[in-house]
Image: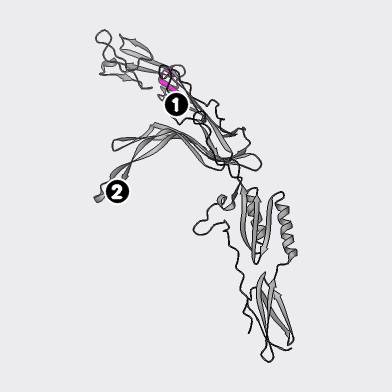
Amino acid sequence: MIIQRVSVAEEKIAEAVVVNPKEVLVNGKTPGETSLILWQQGGNRILFDLHVRANPARLDAVRAQLKQELSGQEVSITLEGDSVFLRGTAKDLVSAERALAIAETLGKPVNLLHVKVPPVEEQVLLKVRFANVDRAASLDLGANILSTGALNTQGQITTGAFSPARAVGVVGESPLNLTDALNVFLFRPDLNLGATIRALQSKRLLEVLAEPNLLAINGKPASFLAGGEFPVPIVQAGIGGAGAISIQWREFGVRLNFVPTVTPRGTIRLQAMPEVSSLDYANALVISGFTVPAISTRRVQTEIELESGQSFAIAGLLDNRVIDNLSKIPGIGDIPLLGKLFQSRSRTKSDTELLVVVTPEVVRPIPAGQPVPGVKMPQEFLKGGAPSAPRTPGLEVTGPVPVKPTLETLPVEQLQPKAAPTGGTAAPVQAPATPQPAAPRPQ
């Protein structure tokens, strides 16, 4: 028999190679079914049905790898044509994606896996403590000599060591008024000569303690604000060069933003940004009659990792300042002892301490029937107590309500994120491929 021509119906499944006029070599490419036609010398045709199957050794190797990676999980793999079917139940989404990656080595995967319903996500409570202590002390010491009419002068003559007290009139003729009486004042009426000695000391203490607490689910952001908003005028360009004024609102107060992530090690990784701000009218601006206060802000932005219940001081500030001002009259102020009467000294000391401590903690909801936290009221709200809010009666009144049992497993598609319009990572479920029909037999 001499072969003149060879043809394969589906070249993707198999290929035919003519070795010599009497021999043909058929190579399988992918699993499937196709037809082979041989034309002999004289016009006769011979038709063969080809069935190409995958190498069982390769399939067994993939099954062994799947069993090793997903030990204890009921996951099976079957090969039908060029499609690989995954069936069974995986313990989580990670195991399902790993099984899918292993199945892709054999061909087109069809993901028919189910995944066990995941447990409740862990919830993290973040405790933040802002401790701020601001201390200041000032000391003013000096002497001011003044005359109300010495040497036949009109008005008042003063050394001007510091802001002097005003003396109006002469003692014995008219009342003597002092604008700053918190001093030691000496006056000689016969000489119209007086002296004011200032020795003042002041102290200031400011303590701020803010403890915001915020709860968030694992991996989800949460924010908290206890404060308010203040209006800020904004000038906008108008028609003809005339500007229009609009109002924007800016927030201030105690703010907390954080994202907790519970790591496989059992620790908690935090992206935290606590902030405490207040209105500062000492540095305010006046624009078109509007007083716009400044904002005094203390903000920290960091990322840390610690165990549940542990604490970290994520920020600290120690600011000590001393300001010493000395004023004197040149020449006279340098004379020993006597020169002290022509000098004034002002000294201000300030001490600021700021500490920010964070403490994350994995928490659980309060069990039903247990008392919940509340705010202790200094006085009773209403006589007889506040009435309870209206609500739907519980099971003790309505009786047990039939509830559909919780599903033990879910399809993978329900747990995977939905694919974006441009494509996603979720593997779509594919239908089994339809085998190619064989070529008709010659009549």
Cα distance in 3D space between marks 2 and 1: 47 Å
Q: Is residue 415 magenta?
A: no
* The quarter of the displayed image where residue 282 is located: top left
Residue 438 location (% of width, % of height): 63, 76
Q: Residue at x 53, y 42 (%)?
A: 220
Q: Nearer the viewer, residue 3 or 108?
A: 3
Q: Is residue 181 left or right of residue 11?
A: left
Residue at (74, 86) in percent of width and height: 22
**Badge 2 or badge 1: first in the primary sequence:** 2
Residue 32 percent location from the top left of the image: 66, 70
Q: Which residues are magenta?
A: 335-347
- Say if 418 sits above or below 141 in the image: below
The residue most toward the top is 172
Looking at numbered disc 2 in the image, what kind of residue is underneath it? Ala
Query: Quadrant where the N terminus lies?
Result: bottom right
Residue 316 visible (yes or no): no
* Residue holding disc 1: 325
Q: Is residue 254 left or right of residue 81?
A: left
Whether residue 162 is situated above or below residue 294 in the rendered picture: above
Which mark identifies residue 64?
A: none
Residue 417, horizontal then vertical, whole percent: 54, 52
Between 137 and 53, which is closer to the camera in this rendering?
A: 53
The percent coordinates of residue 126 (x first, y second) are 55, 34
Residue matched to label 2:
237
